[in-house]
């Protein structure tokens, strides 16, 4: 899992310049081909060391889809529609990793883990004709250099934009809570609360409804509120609920039902914050949307991977590590938003309006 997450985070930075240099579709073909070949290798592998390496390669191939899809949202839709479209995108980007453990558990129980990689390879192959049907959303910029120095300069130009680093970092720290939950929940539910594997699968699937459902509710909220207002309110609730969960974990007041309820609220907050933070992060960019979306994805997955490592490091037969890290990441997210927005002098709203000052 660690090798996969590292590849997923690092690969984001690889594809950003490629998507801006060659257009959206050619890198998609290359990434999918790498993913399919690596999946076949995982099916045939006979030792754990090779499997770890192939999982890293598989992640490098797979992450092109996430980067390209976010860049294409910026290509295809006016900026005022971005938050709504990102919310719909979460149905796929967010739902798949939330539902996958449940499906994978049943496949493994009925057959064996090797079959999972055959299914993943087939899914990758089915995506190739889908890419063929995609419209050409971006004219390749052949003047973009793929040498290290210009690439680093391009990333730096994006990273130092106040609106980007404020909302990208705030959203990434909020999103970190999702990764902490995904990595820590098996121990919490199966070891602490002693639920069976199938019961855990249903709990996991049920909690995913909070994350996915909140992202879709976001479209209703956008009719009355701006993306920043929604993100700020959701982060505030995330901080309050995570602190309550952490405090309750210290004193051991939450049973199974209470733990599920608290996690559900926090996942709802993440699902609401993410599309709005993403839209606000990418709003200032058009020509280098691929670079911006890849850096955004790298931040989200990089911090998410860091969160999973923290949960493993502070392993404990209580909910305290998971609750503490979720509370910490939520507090940092809100602080980044409140402090960073002071440096945004000319903000491009996800509503398409440029606001001067605060």
Image (spheres, grey):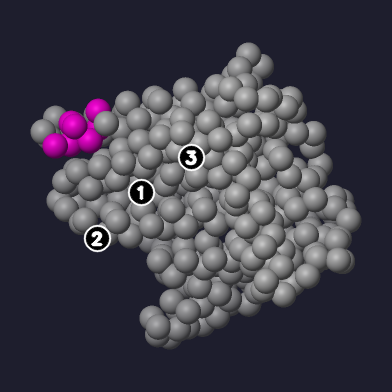
Q: Residue at x 47, y 22 (%)?
A: 233
Q: Which residues are magenta?
A: 244-250
Q: Is residue 245 left or right of residue 52?
A: left
Screen quadrant of the C terminus:
top right
Look at mark 2 in the image and give the residue it sits on: 313
Q: Is residue 339 above or below residue 112?
A: above
Q: Residues within 10 Å of mark 2 (few under 14, many from 20)?
A: few
Q: Is residue 159 above or below residue 35?
A: above
Look at mark 1 in the image and give the residue it sits on: 180
Which SS does the magenta portion mostly show?
A: helix
Give 212 or 178, whichever is nearer the viewer.
Answer: 178
Give 163 or 53, whichever is nearer the viewer.
Answer: 163
Q: Position of residue 239 (x, y in %)?
A: 35, 30
Q: Position of residue 147 (x, y in %)?
A: 72, 75
Q: Residue at x 40, y 83 (%)?
A: 49
Q: Earlier in the sequence, mark 1 or mark 3?
A: 3
Q: Residue furthest left?
A: 251
Look at mark 3 in the image and give the residue it sits on: 170
Magenta stretch encompasses residue 245: yes
**Can I make out residue 246 in this image?**
yes
Marks 1/3: CA distance?
A: 16 Å
Q: Position of residue 84 (x, y in %)?
A: 67, 30
């Amino acid at each position: 899992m660690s090798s996969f997450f590292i590849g997923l985070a690092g690969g984001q930075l690889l594809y950003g310049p490629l998507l801006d240099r060659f257009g959206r579709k050619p890198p998609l073909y290359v990434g999918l081909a790498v993913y399919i070949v690596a999946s076949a290798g995982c099916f045939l592998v006979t030792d754990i060391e090779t499997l770890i390496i192939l999982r890293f390669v598989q992640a490098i191939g797979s992450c092109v889809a996430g980067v390209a899809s976010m860049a294409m949202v910026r290509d295809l839709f006016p900026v005022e529609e971005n938050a709504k479209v990102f919310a719909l995108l979460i149905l796929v980007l967010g739902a798949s990793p939330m539902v996958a453990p449940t499906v994978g558990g049943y496949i493994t129980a009925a057959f064996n883990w090797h079959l999972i990689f055959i299914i993943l390879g087939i899914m990758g192959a089915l995506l190739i004709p889908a890419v063929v049907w995609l419209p050409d959303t971006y004219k390749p910029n052949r003047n973009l250099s793929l040498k290290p120095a210009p690439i680093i300069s391009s990333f730096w130009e994006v990273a130092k934009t106040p609106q980007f680093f404020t909302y990208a970092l705030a959203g990434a720290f909020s999103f970190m809570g999702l990764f902490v939950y995904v990595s820590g929940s098996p121990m919490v539910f199966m070891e602490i609360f002693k639920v069976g594997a199938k019961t855990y699968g249903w709990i996991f699937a049920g909690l995913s409804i909070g994350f996915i459902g909140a992202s879709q509710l976001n479209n209703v909220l956008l009719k009355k509120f701006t993306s920043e207002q929604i993100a700020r309110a959701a982060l505030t609730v995330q901080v309050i609920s995570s602190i309550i969960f952490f405090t309750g974990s210290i004193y051991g007041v939450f049973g199974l039902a209470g733990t599920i309820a608290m996690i559900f609220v926090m996942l709802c907050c993440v699902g609401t914050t993410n599309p709005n933070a993403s839209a606000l992060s990418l709003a200032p960019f058009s020509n280098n949307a691929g670079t911006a979306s890849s850096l955004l994805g790298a931040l989200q997955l990089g911090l998410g991977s860091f969160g999973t490592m923290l949960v493993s490091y502070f392993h404990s037969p209580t909910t305290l590590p998971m609750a503490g890290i979720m509370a910490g990441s939520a507090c940092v997210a809100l602080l980044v938003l409140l402090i960073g927005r002071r440096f945004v002098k000319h903000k491009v709203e996800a509503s398409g309006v440029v606001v001067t000052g605060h």
